[in-house]
Amino acid sequence: MTTTNSDLIGRDDVDDLEAILSVSNTDKDEVVHEVRSNFDTIFTWDYEKGGRPKLDRLYEKAKTSMWNAQTDLPWDTEVDQEAVVIANTAPMGGPAGGMDFTGTPFEKWTEKEWIQLGVESQNWTLSQFMHGEQGALVCTAKIVESVPWIDAKYYAATQTMDEARHVEVFAKYLDEKLSGHYPINAHLRMLLDDIIQDSRWDMTYLGMQIMVEGLALAAFGFMHTLTTEPLLKQLLRYVMSDEARHVAFGVLSLQDYYKELTDAEMRERQEFAFEAAVRMRDRFLQQEVWERMGLPVKESIELVQRAPDRPMFQAMLFAKIVPNCKKLGLLDASQGWLRHRFEELGVIQFEDWADTGEEYDAFALANGEIAAA
Ligand SMILES: [Fe+2]
Ligand SMILES: [Fe+2]
């Protein structure tokens, strides 16, 4: 069985920029997006609560960790987006980055353009977070229907509520504190469509809880550390406390199930995980921001990719995904197929970092942390 990159991701070279940019969102005014999904809805008559003790514990934890998006965050905080951009200087960017821009589209840029880039970049990033959160909302509602165990149905019901709250906070922050929305990125939409379309119940978990939410947890963590804006910082802190539980839900649900799968079945999961990783990596290029700034997209991305801190920054986003895949046996099944792919993507160095099945408690909000808002 030889599956090529071309079969999986539509191109041979994962870094083929031309091919990545040829996928773009051509329906920017779309309001409703339909995806046909075909799967079995499962009832279970086995109501024994706690049959899966780890999931039961997660469910009990979720019930006491709910917060209210409208009342628990300090929405009256004044946000001056440009001042925040200046204070937080974008990681790749600006004259401060020390790169030589002679002969490039950035050559004549003044501080004004660099700030504008930071503003657009933030609008774009938070917009994609919001769209991804809606993906999580829909996927987790699907898990309520498709997973065969009562403890998992209970837990997924709490996660569905969490995700509604996450969509709500990002939408509110974008509307009230930032300066514009972006439509969903085509690579992200393609990934969400693939996850929803798959009829196998565990693929929803693998695509959403392990891959998308694993990346989100790392990305939120990054932004939480970097931002000096107190409302956003607190918002991310709350969202991350939920998100760590969600990733743990994926790990704890799939762990035993994947032990029973054949090598061929595991290989299908590995390929799915690889495809998801590449789609998310393609999304980081934020092609729509360059378009909106009126810059040549390919040239701008090539430049940004050359920033010295870029490889580290991109790789860090996989810091949760790789150890979780290892815990599920996905790295080494099928003669280490996914291990080799992660080596090629330059992210294998995280394999022995803490997996989220163990560390989610560390993200929990402390007693009184919500009231302190
Ligand atoms: Fe979420
Ligand atoms: Fe989540």
Image (tube, rainbow, N blue to C red):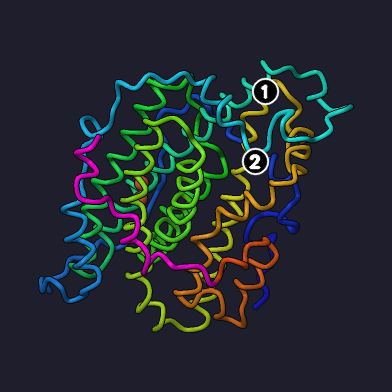
Q: Earlier in the sequence, mark 1 or mark 2?
A: 1
Q: Where on the picture, by quarter, is residue 119?
A: top right
Compare residues 267 and 235 and report the one nearer the observer: 235
Whether the magenta-drawn stretch holds residue 360 is answered as: yes
Residue 16 position in % (x across, y down): 75, 50
Amino acid type indicated by mark 1: Trp
Few, some or many C-alpha atoms within 10 Å of disc 1 (few <14, some 14-19, many ≥20)? some
- Is residue 358 among what the camera can see? yes
Compare residues 75 and 29 and report the one nearer the observer: 75
User: What is the secondary structure assignment of the residue under circle 1?
Assistant: helix
Amino acid type indicated by mark 2: Leu
- Compared across the picture, whether 39 is left or right of 329 comes to left
Mark-to-mark CA distance, 1 and 2:
17 Å
**In the image, which disc is placed on residue 285?**
2
**In the image, which disc is placed on residue 137?**
none
Few, some or many C-alpha atoms within 10 Å of disc 2 (few <14, some 14-19, many ≥20)? many
User: Relative to residue 140, is residue 189 depicted above or below?
Assistant: above
Q: Residue at x 48, y 25 (%)?
A: 181
Q: Is mark 1 within 8 Å of ligand 1?
A: no
Residue 272 position in % (x across, y down): 53, 63
- Location of the C terminus by quadrant is top left
User: What is the secondary structure assignment of the residue under circle 2?
Assistant: loop
In magenta, the rendered stretch is 352-373
Q: Residue furthest right?
A: 103
Whether the magenta-drawn stretch holds residue 268 is answered as: no
User: Relative to residue 203, is residue 365 depicted above or below?
Assistant: above
Q: Residue at x 20, y 59 (%)?
A: 61
User: Relative to residue 344, is residue 53 depicted above or below?
Assistant: below
From the image, tell me which residue sits under label 1.
Answer: 114
